[in-house]
Image (cartoon, rainbow, N blue to C red):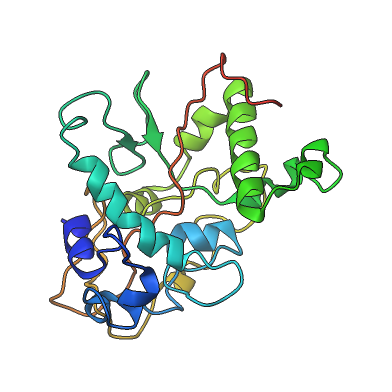
Amino acid sequence: MFLADFHAHWPTDGDHVYVDFVRDGARGHGAARSGVRTWRRVTEVTAGAAKSVFHFDVQGQVAKSTHAGLPWLKFLLEHPALMGTDRMPFMWPFDGWEIPRGRSALVEVYPRLWKHLLPDSHPVMQLGMTDDERDAYVIAKALSDADRDGRLLEWCTPALDHETTAIARYEGWILATADPGRGGKGARDQTAECVSTDAGQFGPHRPGPRRGGGHHTDAQETRPPVGRRRGLSARPGPEDDLGF
């Protein structure tokens, strides 16, 4: 299982274990499971300016949060209070595209898609929020608005071609990146950007409905494995008072 192997090499859920400690070799075995900064998944190409989950030390990086967060997905999947119950978060899209009614879900989001919903002139911006707080607020607002007008269901079941659907079930997908009203590159456009000619530590891209992604170590790498940025409930209820 990808998450078990990743956790063995990047144990960033441990006490006082930071991503940079693993990168520097002080903890874990990160060098054996490191990607190339130029690798981008199909969903990142589709989103336009989304950074690679392997691209560290740049403005707007998501690599550090990805490597810090993945072990916590394993923690959730193995939590005894959640296993075998409907309280287990639905891992979208690895568990499927349609989120069952009444289930919480973990989805990957890209706050830049919705930055326009919270311009600097918005009253909320007078509260002195940090960039991370602003991202969290704009994501919550976007999901709430989309739930009310029906777009959220469309976002969760994007109209992708067969090949892209198979790739997304392996690599993951950023919610709403296939929204035709959002702009950006199409899922079919310039997918060559996702292909690396470098030999890597992760194995070849083999699309398929494998929960949590997958990796192999018996061949050359052509695509990076899954990574997630943030986990959020995909179905905020109408009773939720989010202050919008």
* Figure check: 152 above or below 75: above
Q: In the drawing, does residue 90 fall left or right of residue 206?
A: right
Please name whichever residue, 91 or 164, is drawn nearer the observer in this view of the structure.
91
Quarter of the image that includes the N terminus: bottom left
Q: Residue 216: horizontal and vertical position, in percent?
A: 17, 69
Please name whichever residue, 5 or 75, is drawn nearer the observer in this view of the structure.
75
Q: State the residue at coordinates (37%, 55%).
A: 69
Q: In the drawing, does residue 210 fall left or right of residue 196?
A: left
Determine the residue located farthest toward the top in the rendered image. Answer: 239
Regarding residue 170, the answer to whether it shows in the image is no
Which image quadrant for residue 243? top right
Q: In the drawing, does residue 242 fall left or right of residue 218?
A: right
Regarding residue 83, the answer to whether it shows in the image is yes
Q: State the residue at coordinates (32%, 56%).
A: 70
* Figure check: 8 above or below 31: above
Q: Residue 166: horizontal and vertical position, in percent?
A: 32, 51
Q: State the residue at coordinates (28%, 60%).
A: 15
* Figure check: 109 above or below 148: below
